[in-house]
Amino acid sequence: MPRPRTSRSPHEPVPPGGRRRRGGFAGYHALRTLEKTLPADAAELVLVNPSDYLLYSPLLPDVSAGVVEPRHIAVSLRQQLRRTRVVLGSATAVDTATRTVSVRTTDDGGATDGELELHYDRLVLVPGSITRQFDIPGVAERAHGVKTLVEAQFLRDHLLRQLDRADALPAGPEHDAERRARLTVVAVGAGYTGTEIVAQLQYWLGTIAARWSRVDPADVRWVLIDLAESVLPELGPELGEKALGALRRRGIDVRLGVTVKEAREGETELTDGSTIPSRTLIWGAGVAASPLVATLDRPLQKGRLVVEADLSVPGADGVFAGGDAAAVPDLARRGDEGTPVTPPTAQHAQRQGTALGRNVAASLGFGRAKPYRHRDLGLVADLGGWDAIAKPLGIKLHGPLAKAVARGYHLYALPSMANRVRVGSDWLLAALLPAQSVEVTRIRPDQALVSTAQQSQAHLRR
């Protein structure tokens, strides 16, 4: 296990009784619970996070499609967590023997700005997940994910730029190949993320493509591929078939049982031997736990940190973990074959955060610890327009009713009333006004690659 660095910033004293936290959904809700449970003088609450906001990532497809403004799904940490000190930086290592966390801060350009060593009495590890990548030639250099605001905004503007450049090409067969490549999008991953982003972007581009002189909406081609044999397997075969039917009715070419063999400049080769000319490769093939948890030198289960039912880490005194990076026993689904672990969903992360806050407070003498138990409320998937799939409490829905359930759930899950109002207003305006088709950011392509955009945690760059 890497040892933490010994340097310490002179303005970063180590207070007695300090409590350190870091994370997204789970970290945010853990701190909310601690602020409500602990007396003001019981502990210092510190959050280490690369940004000063909680990103409500389930609405990133809405951001890419221009339906929701980016800042409206960014919840201000300093506004919501009034008793918590926010340290902008990335944890690089954890040493449970010395009870320290090494943190690397960065400047506006992403360069190293400084290093801190923070001591803790209780540590909650909730670093989340990153987009899963595979050792496929060309993917790291050309694939774009949709897990951060940078990626979501880049993808929207990138697609607009492809329409611009295809429209600017002179007429004639000698330019047909480039035009087809610029108007073809290949997306990998027919799970929750990949299906939603393709469906919403396809619907959005279909409403605006006619604004270009030499581009017809029918010219824009979408190819969604996955090694799995079904779309949205998280929602079951019946709803998966409904989603597949909706995608294909809208002209999306869905190919199952196949994936990328190599991504080259201007084309993507698949494992079935076919090659698709394309200037856009979207990567949504699942998630992997943040590698930060491996620095603890504690047992992992498929890359996720093994924890007890109360979310404590065995053999690491004072350390708790939850969210996507932890293998949390799913007591609500315990059966004859043992206890599975909870899936890496925002729903579980949010509720595990509340349990983390309660159990950490109990370890300090305030309240009683309880094992984490939550029966999944179901998943929702917004496919653009009136198409949606939902399974609330086991009830299978599709179409407009599922759309209402999906949006209602997102408004409920957003942890800030101000953000709820802004997102709700965005949806209303999108329904009443023509879709926008303007490029307002200038994010470089290399900044939005999966291999770079999600490397805000410094330990991933070692």
Image (cartoon, helix red, strand yellow):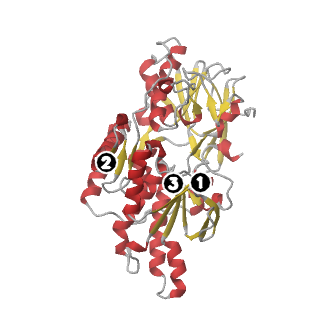
Q: Left or right: where does residue 132 sit relative to residue 224?
A: right
Which residue position is annotated with label 3?
150
Q: Amino acid at mark 1?
A: Val
Determine the CA span between mark 1 and mark 2. Answer: 29 Å
Which sits earlier in the primary sequence, circle 3 or circle 2? Answer: 3
Q: Residue furthest bottom?
A: 172
Q: Residue at x 60, y 68 (%)?
A: 274
Q: Residue at x 72, y 22 (%)?
A: 97
Q: Which mark is residue 403?
A: 2
| Circle 2: element type | helix
Q: Residues within 10 Å of mark 3 (few under 14, many from 20)?
A: some
In terms of image quadrants, where is residue 2?
Answer: top right
Asked if residue 387 can be seen in this view, the reply is: yes
Q: Nearer the viewer, residue 54 or 203?
A: 203
Q: Amino acid at mark 3?
A: Val
Q: Residue at x 70, y 34 (%)?
A: 295
Q: Quadrant of the C terminus?
A: top right
Q: Which mark is residue 450?
A: 1
Q: Amino acid at mark 2?
A: Lys
Which sits earlier in the primary sequence, circle 3 or circle 1? Answer: 3
Determine the CA span between mark 3 and mark 2. Answer: 26 Å
Q: Give the mark count.
A: 3
